[in-house]
Image (tube, rainbow, N blue to C red):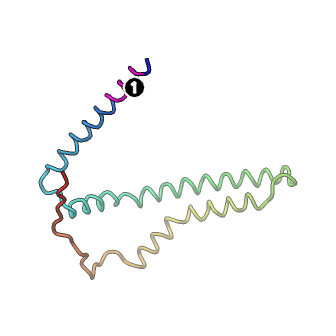
Amino acid sequence: MKRALYRKLLLAQAAVTVGLMAGSEDAYAAPGNDFSDIAENMISSIEALPGLLTGLAYMMGLLLGVLGVLKVKDHVENPSQTALKDGAIRMASGGALFALPIVFEAMQTTIGTTTNFVEPARLNRIDFNVR
């Protein structure tokens, strides 16, 4: 029984490996896949990251603010069990996270990312001959 199960598992692993290798062959065979194209794809994919971080910062700031208010409420109901500093720390952290996107936008505006005085280096071609 164990031998049959082991054999099926081995066949499944071989099928997955063959499938992955077949898919990777198409990726290597495509013309024009060089380091510059890969870098441009990475840059275009990263452009949406600030919006995602802004949303996460707002959500986590709100969550920590609400948890801070609940801890302060717990302190009011039972001061000997819950310290006031627990709620205050959570509310301060929530406020900092809530203000983070605004601070980031102010930094970006101050530094100025619209003018490029220096052209970045560009790698023209790189070949990997791995078979």
Q: Residue furthest bottom?
A: 117
Tell me the amino acid under the disc marked 1. Answer: Tyr
- Judge from the rendering whether residue 49 lies leftward or rightward of residue 75; answer left or right: left
Q: Reply yes or no: does residue 63 show up in magenta.
A: no
Frontmost residue, 17 versus 102: 17
Figure quadrant of residue 113: bottom left
**Magenta part of the chain:** 3-11
- Name the magenta segment's main secondary structure: helix
The residue shown at (40%, 79%) is 111
Q: Residue at x 37, y 77 (%)?
A: 112
Q: Find disc 1 in the rendering and name its residue.
A: 6
Badge 1 density bin: few <14, some 14–19, many ≥20, Cα 10 Å: few
User: Would residue 122 appear left or right of 66 to someone viewing this image?
Assistant: left
Check if residue 7 falls in the magenta segment: yes
Q: Is residue 18 above or below residue 84?
A: above
Q: Residue at x 25, y 75 (%)?
A: 120
